[in-house]
């Protein structure tokens, strides 16, 4: 069986965590399965993770997947490339890729195109839990409805996304809600990083500033204030990078404000990054999956996000008040103080742990349904 995973890329540790979580669930059940990702992945990364390559249908202006069938499979297989006709299951783990923010092209090329005729060919197409919507711009609602007709199962991560879906497809019966499934991963912290146990971590995200210089200044001002206030309360503070050069630039700008720069954690393995976050005492993050890594390990976290998915995630863990607004600087100190206090609040930590257990059970139920669907299709 050949399983294609789209919507993940090695530059994003959150995406790599989804890849790891998918294989952790499916590899034991389907030991002979080949896992594949689009060949836009760097070859060394595909080799590193033991992945095959597929021809992407959302690359540039041309859908190369439509023409790839003209190339004999005997020429591609030795190169580790699978043709679209070879794929039995397509798992879409995009995270957040379908809605007005991204526009119609990505929706039509990555989702609507493969969905067309997919069931007729006896293949499975599953949208793993992700944030979606809204679908208010011209053509978006029609395209998403068309996609749903070809999808076997579609999961959304939050109630806001579900409301967006129901607004355009109220009669759809293949939509379910489930949390982000990286909450099932429990990696161990390497001994070489044991000094980070109990640290307070800052996880920046360049998308928060949206290329706006004023927003960038406010964001860096908040992060610097958070560092100073946490250090004043006795917390050792470090910066964790979750993705790319933009986040690194923010970390460099933040460190320039201190006479003693903070330790910068930029691990190659996403599972190690998750382990570092899970061993922290407190986390301030603008990266969604860093928040999942913290909350699922019952680590108090403060979110400074850029879309509805952040508030919905915090609500799932009973942490609705642990949100930062960059437009309300007078509230920053209070929120940072609440985070610091939560570290020592046994009742809060127990409630957070209970929520984490509940969220993991929801993910387990989701995977049970997904595996049953795949097994039924393969029978």
Image (cartoon, helix red, strand yellow):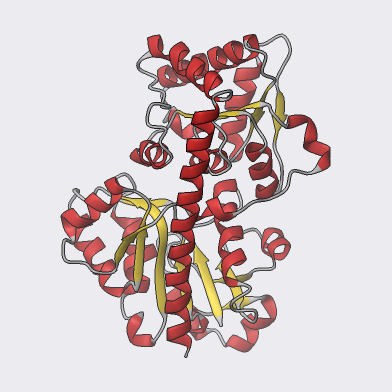
The quadrant of the picture occupied by the N terminus is bottom right
**Towards the viewer: 119 or 65:** 119
Q: Which residue is farthest bottom?
A: 379
Residue 65 versus residue 266 in the image, above or below: below
The mark total stands at 0
Instruction: Mark yes or no: residue 67 visible.
Output: no
**Image side of residue 285 versus residue 171, left or right:** right
Q: Residue at x 53, y 74 (%)?
A: 3
Position of residue 112 measured from the top left corner of the image (x, y, whole percent): 31, 67
Residue 288 versus residue 131 in the image, above or below: above
- Which quadrant of the figure has residue 231? top right
**Towards the viewer: 99 or 336:** 336
Instruction: Mark yes or no: residue 131 visible.
Output: yes
Q: Residue at x 37, y 72 (%)?
A: 114
Position of residue 47 measured from the top left corner of the image (x, y, whole percent): 72, 65
**Towards the viewer: 180 or 242:** 180
Residue 234 versus residue 244 in the image, above or below: above
**Image side of residue 255 versus residue 145, left or right:** right
Q: Residue at x 60, y 19 (%)?
A: 254
Q: Which residue is farthest right?
A: 192
Position of residue 371 measured from the top left corner of the image (x, y, whole percent): 48, 74
Position of residue 279 measured from the top left corner of the image (x, y, whole percent): 67, 37
């Amino acid at each position: 069986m050949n399983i294609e995973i789209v919507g993940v890329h090695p530059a994003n540790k959150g995406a790599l965590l989804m890849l790891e979580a998918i294989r952790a669930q499916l590899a034991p059940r389907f030991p002979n399965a080949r896992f594949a990702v689009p060949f836009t992945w760097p070859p060394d990364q595909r080799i590193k993770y033991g992945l095959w390559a597929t021809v992407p249908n959302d690359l540039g202006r041309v859908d190369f997947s439509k023409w790839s069938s003209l190339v004999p499979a005997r020429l591609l297989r030795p190169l580790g490339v699978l043709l679209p006709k070879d794929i039995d299951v397509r798992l879409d783990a995009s995270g957040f890729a379908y809605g007005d923010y991204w526009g119609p092209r990505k929706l039509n090329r990555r989702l609507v195109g493969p969905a067309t005729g997919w069931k007729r060919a006896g293949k499975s197409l599953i949208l793993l839990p992700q944030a979606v919507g809204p679908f208010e711009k011209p053509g978006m609602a029609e395209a998403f409805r068309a996609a749903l007709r070809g999808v076997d199962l579609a999961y959304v991560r939050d109630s806001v996304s579900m409301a967006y879906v129901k607004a355009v497809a109220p009669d759809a019966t293949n939509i379910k809600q489930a949390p982000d499934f990286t909450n099932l991963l429990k990696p161990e912290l390497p001994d070489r990083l044991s000094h980070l146990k109990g640290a307070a971590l800052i996880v920046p995200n360049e998308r928060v500033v949206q290329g706006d210089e004023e927003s960038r200044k406010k964001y860096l001002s908040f992060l610097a204030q958070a560092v100073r206030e946490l250090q004043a309360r006795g917390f050792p503070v470090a910066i964790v990078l979750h993705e790319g050069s933009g986040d690194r630039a923010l970390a460099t700008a933040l460190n320039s404000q201190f006479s003693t720069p903070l330790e910068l954690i930029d691990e190659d393995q996403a599972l190690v990054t998750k382990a570092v976050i899970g061993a922290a005492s407190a986390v301030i993050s603008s990266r969604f999956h860093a928040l999942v890594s913290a909350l699922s390990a019952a680590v108090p976290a403060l979110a400074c996000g850029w879309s509805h998915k952040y508030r919905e995630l915090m609500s799932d863990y009973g942490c609705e008040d642990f949100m930062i607004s960059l437009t309300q600087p007078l509230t920053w100190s209070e929120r940072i103080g609440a985070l610091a206090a939560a570290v020592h609040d046994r009742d809060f930590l127990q409630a957070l742990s209970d929520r984490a257990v509940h969220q993991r059970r929801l993910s387990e139920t989701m995977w049970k349904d997904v595996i049953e669907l795949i097994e039924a299709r393969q029978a």
